[in-house]
Image: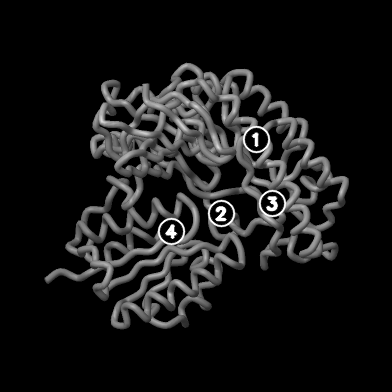
Amino acid sequence: MTASLKTLTLGCKVNQYETQYVREGLLSAGFHDAAETEPADLCVINTCTVTAEGDAKSRQAIRRLHRENPHARIVVMGCYATRAPDEVAVLPGVAEVVTDKRELPDLLGRYGVVDLPTGISGLTGRSRAYVKVQDGCLLRCSYCIIPTVRPQMASRPQADIMAEVERLLMRGYREIVLTGIHLGHYGVDFNSGRSRGEWTRLATLLKTLCGLAPDHRFRIRLSSIEATEVTRQLLETMQDHAPRVCRHLHVCLQSGSDRVLRRMRRRWNVKRIVDRVRLAQDHLPGLAVTTDVIVGFPGETEEDFQQTLEVCRTIGFSKIHIFPFSPRRGTDAATYPDQISAKTKQERVARLTALEAELRGRFLQSLVGQHVEILIERQEPHWIMGTTCRFAPCRTVVTSDTPTMKPGDLIRCRVIGHDGQAFSGAID
């Protein structure tokens, strides 16, 4: 009987991809997925350290795995394992700590994997497939621990990515999400010594991928990217290959105050961000622009916060991911003396949340009457739920006349309304 395996992932899309990579490698060596109630022989957990809460959740998950699988070898990988390997090593059941993702081939070899995977062939339990194209971040934002645990810039060869995407399409995936630690830096490490005209960029990769499998209906979505890395070349590629590329960009604002951005050690000012988003909106009418905002960064004044609100109104984000500032041990911002009180952060989060609801409703209303493409993710007898190309959920009623469909399929429907959070649609 073969050894049984359980995997668990905390954190970002890149982590989810890397866990799947390890899982597929181990399955190729004879492991099998343990049933939910079956104790496993080997547990692999991929951890997160982006916040102190991520550390705590990682520790809790390791302890839970040990309780439920008391005789299992537990292998811990991921950003928390890299940042604090000694903390991880003493947790119950931990047999091995992987401190560098570049060690994964060696790890798999120790567990009998002979032919290393060049990518993944699916993503367990998900209708969309994440494809990691890049790793590492060279920035040193004052609040972020990630460059400490993923400092090596590395882009995957385009040929490997193309082969992986083709494999995923053959397996029935109809949305491919390109992801990386710093997605906009894809290709930077390839370009040393090349003339500008020979540079490999994210736009180069996107254009190539759009040309794959012309007989297949599928779409590509970009994950988080810096606004200043939304180049004209990238926008022209998105424009030329619509609707194959989702009309959605997630750009990282973090603050609408130049003073706060400087303290965050961000590389651009507000005007540059707004100008680049405006350029994107001009190229791609109906573009959904989502963002991240940190509220209550050390030293943030009421005037700074008002500027953030104003920038959000100016851009008209369709969704804002709001994060009250949490000091991260090991970052400069955690040592700043002018920390903001929890009460003030809570009050500002509430105000930004109210604005986010207003802007989201306005964006959803702007698409009523238009046709959108939906990736089906949940199906019930009389309705389906999925995600539109504009990254908003849509609930659509189905009738006896509706064509047969299933989760993972792409369909088109007409937007007939919304409830402030999601569309309601009708299949024509």
Q: Do we see residue 247 in this rendering?
A: yes
> Vertical placement of 309 versus 277: above or below?
below
Depth check: give the residue in front, 28 or 427.
427
Say which mark, if any, is on residue 151: 2
**Residue 418, x across and y down, in percent:** 54, 34
- Distance, label 2 to label 4, CA atoms, is 11 Å
The residue where tag 3 is placed is: 141
Depth check: give the residue in front, 331 or 93.
93
Disc nearest the viewer among 1 and 4? 1
- Distance, label 1 to label 4, CA atoms, is 34 Å
Q: Residue at x 79, y 51 (%)?
A: 263
Say which mark, if any, is on residue 101: 4
Sooner in the amino-acid sequence: mark 4 or mark 3: 4
The residue where tag 1 is placed is: 317
**Residue 337, x across and y down, in percent:** 84, 65
Label 3: which secondary element: loop
Quarter of the image with the N terminus is bottom left
- Distance, label 4 to label 3, CA atoms, is 22 Å
- Distance, label 2 to label 1, CA atoms, is 30 Å
Disc 1 residue crowd, few under 14, some 14–19, many 20+, Cα 10 Å? many
* Label 1–label 3 contact, CB within 8 A: no
Disc nearest the viewer among 2 and 3? 3
Rendered image quadrant of residue 284: top right
Depth check: give the residue in front, 352 or 419.
419
